[in-house]
Image (tube, rainbow, N blue to C red):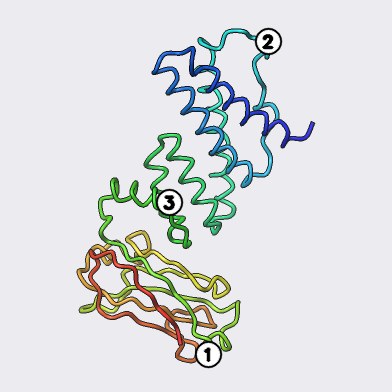
Amino acid sequence: MPEVFWFAIVVLAFIAIAFVTLPLANAKQRKTAIGAAIVVAITAAGLYASLGTVPSDELAFADSSTTSFTSTATSSAENKIGTVASMVDGLAEKLKIEPDDGKSWLLLAQSYEHLGRIPEAIDAYKKAQSLGQNNAGLDILLMSNAENVSAQIYGRVTLSENAKEQVLPTDTVFVFARASEGPMMPLAVLRRPASELPIDFLLNDDQAMSADTKLSTADHVVVTARITRTGVATETLQNLEAQSGVISVVDNNHISLNIE
């Protein structure tokens, strides 16, 4: 039988279990069963779309002739959480091979959060952000847990109509922040292919070139977006770059850089 059929059965079965249990179980059991069903349904759907196949041996059900759900619904749902955790680990392995897949990093972060694996969720979300993927709920999680959450700069890089005529998809976009005063070494650097323009970006300490010179060590910076054809950050293509004014690192303002 097709894998997708079994997957659909899993999702529907857990939702059914939650609602059948609702009038029978006490408040704690209802909360556990329904919460587990929602986590499984939402997380498994995203993971199935990303991974493509759910192992059929992980989708086995207890005998449908069972007549008592009160004592079994919660434990069954919790067992399936283990299945989802296995799928999450599979997605993490996939991203070791395809580390530039921002949407999958975002899905991994959301999955880790659902499973209560908060440190791993934060790490995955930082990867997703560096690839232009953002999520309001995970932003709150990051702000609540990261030590240097104020040391980050959000923004968007766009091209003018004139610049579009000169830029090739194979060109490279560098986005970097330098201290407004002092050494010229970038405090944070992001590199993306021009084919992804317009690009939403996040600069933070994870993109530091040196442990001693990172975004959180500066109060004010200037952010530059630059197009290069050679892939070398210091070689600008036809003067195609945009630069912000002096901005405060702790303000967390969204900046727009339009390359003309």
Q: How far from the left and from the top, in percent, is residue 37? A: 52, 28
Residue placed under numbered mark 2 in the picture: 65
Badge number at residue 125: 3
Q: Position of residue 259 (x, y in %)?
A: 45, 83
- In the displayed structure, 81 sits above or below 99; it is above
Query: Which residue ends up furthest to the top in the rendered image?
Result: 67
Q: Residue at x 53, y 73 (%)?
A: 197
| Side of 89 where 115 appears, left or right | left
Q: Secondary structure at mark 2?
A: loop
Q: Which structural element holds mark 3?
A: helix
Residue 99 is situated, as x and y percent measured from the top left of the image, at 54, 56
* Of the image marks 3 and 2, the number of the one nearer the N terminus: 2
Task: Report the front residue among 104 and 213.
Answer: 104
Type of the residue with mark 1 = Asn
Q: CA distance from mark 1 to mark 2?
A: 69 Å
Q: Give the mark, 1 or 3, whose residue is nearer the N terminus.
A: 3
* Callout 2 crowding tier (Cα within 10 Å): few <14, some 14–19, many ≥20: few
Q: Quadrant of the N terminus?
A: top right
Position of 34 with respect to 149 (left or right) is right
Label 2 is placed on what type of residue?
Answer: Ser
